[in-house]
Amino acid sequence: MLEKLTGTFSNIVKTISGKSTITEKNIEETVEQIKMALLEADVNLRVVRRFVNSTIEEAKGEKVLKSVNPGQQFVKIIHDKMVTMLGDSKQDLHLKGPDTQSVILMLGLQGAGKTTAAHKLAAKLLKEGRKPLLVACDLVRPAAVEQLCQLGEKIGVPVYKEDGKDAVKTAKNAIAHAKKNQFDTIIIDTAGRLQIDEEMMAELVKIKKATDPVEVLLVADAMTGQNAVDIAQSFDEQLGLTGVILTKFDSDARGGAALSLKSITGKPILYIGTGEKTEDFEQFHPDRIASRILGMGDIVSLVEKAQETVDEEAALKMAKKLQRNEFTLQDYLEQFQQVKKMGNIQSIMDMIPGMSGMDASQMDFSSLKKNEAIIQSMTYKERLNHLIIGPSRRKRIAKGSGTSVADVNKLLKQFEKTKLMMKKMSRNKGMQGKMMSQLGIDPSALGGMGGGLPGGMDLSSLKGMDMKKLQEMARRFR
């Protein structure tokens, strides 16, 4: 996400943090670079001016110029100003207790991703123990109701719909249906237009009056840049927004929307859509996003993602296998599949300190899919004992996976090297510490980690980590 902006800021941070002394000239030159980077990212001009002026004012203070490490202190100032611009701290939905209905009204222009965002939010709330109901009130866009029904069925959340064309009546009846069937959260998907018009706004105002929502959320496309700010202001004037969901945040968006919304509208960004899958939906943490933009990574979010996707029992089983040197191709396959569950490779890289902003396409991650196909073409017996895979078996596996014998040979060599490295690491705590230090991570905070993934990292070992230690470690990064 925000690759171009992250790349620019990462270079600025690397340059300035290495300086033993900071002069007024250094500050002015760096701030000028920051200003150009923000303007290129389509950040609102007023926001850029505020950011630049406050950074210069604080950075030129005696506290910074006389500090022990001026470069790192200046980076901290930039980070803190970025967090303030993004919204200071994360905001939660203000939902009522489980015995009372909480209505969430979803608004936005057509094409922003309201329907997809509605089902992602429903899936998230379902995981958190709520009992959500999706309501199909987009009666304008063809197939919008059917789309919501399919998405609701996919995540196991019922969808309330009616055959008529009265969205206000549908919304009212949905509230009654929810009370009767004890749904505690009603998420209403409303109609959008290609642009804001009086008819759409009038309908939304009526729906709001009829349903009395606790949250009025604008779903905005991150790719629209600071135009999203103008859209948010228009909706807020007539409907009183309580928050924003930014979709398509995984695109190479310039970042103008994310960096301008809170400062200009005063409305917090609550969630971001980071992909097409249901699980590609994150709560917006300003401090963590700021760290990613500055190239510092976001190890806390990485661990949280691992804890959501990794089975604790499977993780313990894997740890024992590593200790006994019983790692097999079947385990190797499970590691690939574990990475896929966590989301796309680019989003994982953005969370690792030192790798944030790097382009995954430039790294050798394309072989993951190929290797997965090769292992899946093997018999279970071959996966458990790769030594029995002779020339004839390799030909059969290559044919079954649509690859070449050379690809199969390469995978087996890679597996043997990984297994050997993991064997050494399981016996050598110093090597584990060295690897973690290269990632910019304190080994004592994370504990030992095995291998199996590009870079030698086994995400199953993130399962039981102490989140307080990680939060403290993240603060030390900044």
Image (cartoon, rainbow, N blue to C red):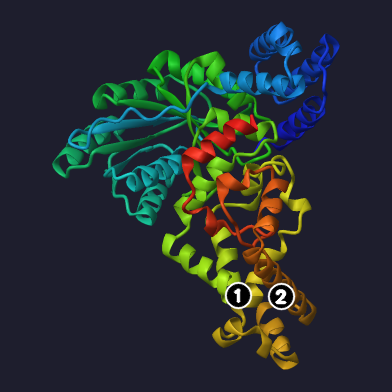
Is disc 2 surrounded by few (<14), some (14 to 19) or many (20+) residues within 10 Å?
A: some
Query: 470 or 212: nearer the eye?
Result: 470
The x, y position of residue 150, in whole percent, is 39, 53
- Tell me which corner region of the image, top left, top right, bottom left or bottom right, holds residue 15: top right
User: Residue at the location (53% across, 25% down)?
Assistant: 195
Residue 473 location in percent, x, y?
58, 37
For the question of whether residue 111 can be seen, the reply is no
Local secondary structure at mark 2: helix
Label 2 amino acid?
A: Glu
Would you say 301 lies left or right of 64 here? left
Taking depth in this image into account, of 355 and 367 the one nearest to the observer is: 355
Looking at the rendered structure, the kind of residue marked 1 is Asn
Residue farthest toward the bottom in the current orientation of the protein: 392
In the figure, residue 385 lies in which quadrant?
bottom right
Q: Give the secondary structure at mark 1.
A: loop
Q: Is residue 98 visible?
A: yes
Q: Which residue is mark 1?
A: 325
Q: Nearer the viewer, mark 2 or mark 1?
A: 1
Disc 1 crowd, CA 10 A, few/some/many (<14, 14-19, 20+):
some
Q: CA distance from mark 2 to mark 1?
A: 12 Å
Q: Residue at x 27, y 21 (%)?
A: 209
In percent of width and height, residue 353 lies at 67, 41
Q: Is residue 287 above or below residue 125?
A: above
Q: Which residue is mark 2?
A: 416
Of the image marks 2 and 1, the number of the one nearer the N terminus: 1
Q: Position of residue 333 (x, y in %)?
A: 59, 70
**Residue at image x 70%, y 77%?**
402
| Residue at the left extreme, as displayed | 180
